[in-house]
Structures are given as structure tokens and as C-alpha cells.
Image (tube, grey):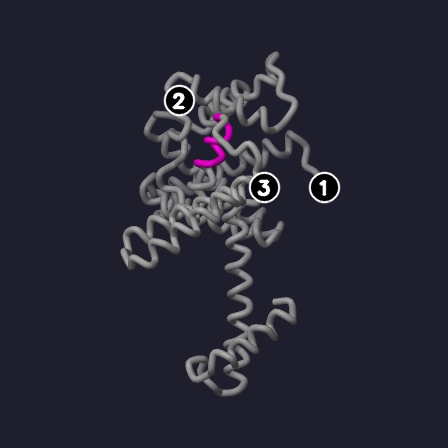
Amino acid sequence: METKTREAKLEAFGHLLDVLDRLRIECPWDRKQTNESLRSNTIEEMYELCDAIIRDDNDDIKKELGDLLLHIVFYAKIGEEKAVFDIGDVCDALCRKLIYRHPHVFGSTAAETSRKVEQNWEQLKLNERGGNKTVLEGVPSSLPSLVKAHRIQDKARNAGFDWEERTQVWDKIREEFEELEAEISTMDANLIEAEFGDLFFSLINAARLYKINPDNALERTNQKFIRRFNYLEEKAREQNRPLKEMTLAEMEALWTEAKTKGL
């Protein structure tokens, strides 16, 4: 791929702004969109981008980035129509934030490691006027629970609240598992749910400590399960048998066969 010049990149972005300006005037669908109507589509586009990233499909990543960029420009256009901000304001605010939060690049602060950069970032966010007043305030409440747990733990780490040695987390996981087993014997659904939550939280913490993204790890397993289960269904159809009529041993044999095929 030939790398575009800075001028060509700016021209391409300007073309996008021109296209959206025209769509906003001439297209009935684009004309009626609001922040609220776009929100659910934006969330969907984010997940589609995440799927493309997990598949490492560069063509799809490029496409989904374009779809997401359209939404960003669209929100800025709506802000411009309301006379509250435009895409220039969005870019200027972002640049100011990046410069402020990277004093090791644009100032005299020293930060030799990415860990130190992250710690500085969180402290600067707390210091910003109108910024987060607590360490965990910046974690969006609408995040999926697994992703939210990872962000909570990461922010707590940047504030210095973390294990001294990452191997210590395994004792915590064993402790939470034992507590879950104890509550299962009570058959109290609320207590069991609470202990499952504690165990999940500890497992996510272990993933973080070993530099594994738990959401990516779980999605890889989801996709692996789908491939193997699809294989199982396909083989059942070849035998003209519904899955429900197969014994667990027969299904397990096909599952093992799928594993040997690398699915």
C-alpha cells in the first residue's frame, strides 16, 4: 500500500466532511438523524470493529473504522447545527488533552516506561478542572460487565492498589472458589450469584496481571466453541439425525474429532 501524504490525508478528510454536509441536506434518512437515533448504531459499529480486530482482518478493520469515523463526523455535524461545537472543536479539544496528558513528550516530566505513563495519565485526569473527582469515576457505567471489571482493576492499579506479586492472585482465586463451593451447598441463589461474581472478578484480575485481555480471551473461546458446535451439527445432518437424538458420548466423540481437525 502506498502511504498517502499529509496533504492527501487532509484532502480525504475534507472530502468526507463535504459528503456528509450534502447528505445531511439531500438525504431524507441522514437529515432526520439525531444523537439519540445514532447511539445504538454507534454501539453496533464499535462491536463490528472489535470483531474485525479479533479476526485480524485488515480489510474489515479499514471498513469498520470508516463506519465509526462517519459516526464521529455525524455527531460533530449535529453539534455544529446546534451551534455548540463542530469537528474543529472536537479535534482541538482532543489535541489539548493529549498534550496535557503527555508532559513527558510535550513538557519536562520524565516517564521512561508505559506503566509510569499510565500512572501519570490517571493523576492528570484527577487534576483536570472538571475532570474525574475519583479514580473510578471515569469508568463508564454502560460498559459490559467483563470490560468494566478489567477497567476498574486497571485504574485501581494505576493508583497503586495492586498485588505486590502477580502470583498472589491465585491464592485469591482459590479462596473465592472455596467460598463459592460453600455457598452452593446453601442453595441460596443470591449468595451463589455474589460468589460467582467474586470468582469472575478474581479471574479477570489474573488475566490483567498476566497481560491478557479477558474480553479477547473469552471471545476467542466463544468463536472456538461455535466452530466446534457447527461441526457437530454438520456431522449430525450428514447422518440424518437431530442432535437431540444423539447420546452425549456420540456428541463428545464428534467434539473430539473437531478438536483434532484444529477447529
**10 Å crowding of disc 2: few (<14), some (14-19), many (20+):** few
- Secondary structure found at label 3: loop
Viewer can see residue 65: no
Identified by mark 2, the residue type is Gly
The amino acid on which the numbered mark 3 sits, given as a three-letter code, is: Lys
Is 217 colored magenta in this rendering? Answer: no
Range of the magenta residues? 152-159
The CA distance from mark 3 to mark 1 is: 34 Å
Mark number, residue 131: 2
Callout 3 touching callout 1 (CB < 8 Å): no
Q: Quadrant of the C terminus?
A: bottom right
Placement of 220 over or under 67, stated as above or below? below
Q: Quadrant of residue 31?
A: top left
Say which residue label 1 marks.
2
* Amino acid, disc 1: Glu
Tell whether position 153 is magenta: yes
User: Which is more N-terminal, label 2 or label 3?
Assistant: 2
CB-based contact (under 8 Å), mark 3 and mark 2: no
In what element is the residue under mark 2?
loop
- Labels 3, 2: front one: 3
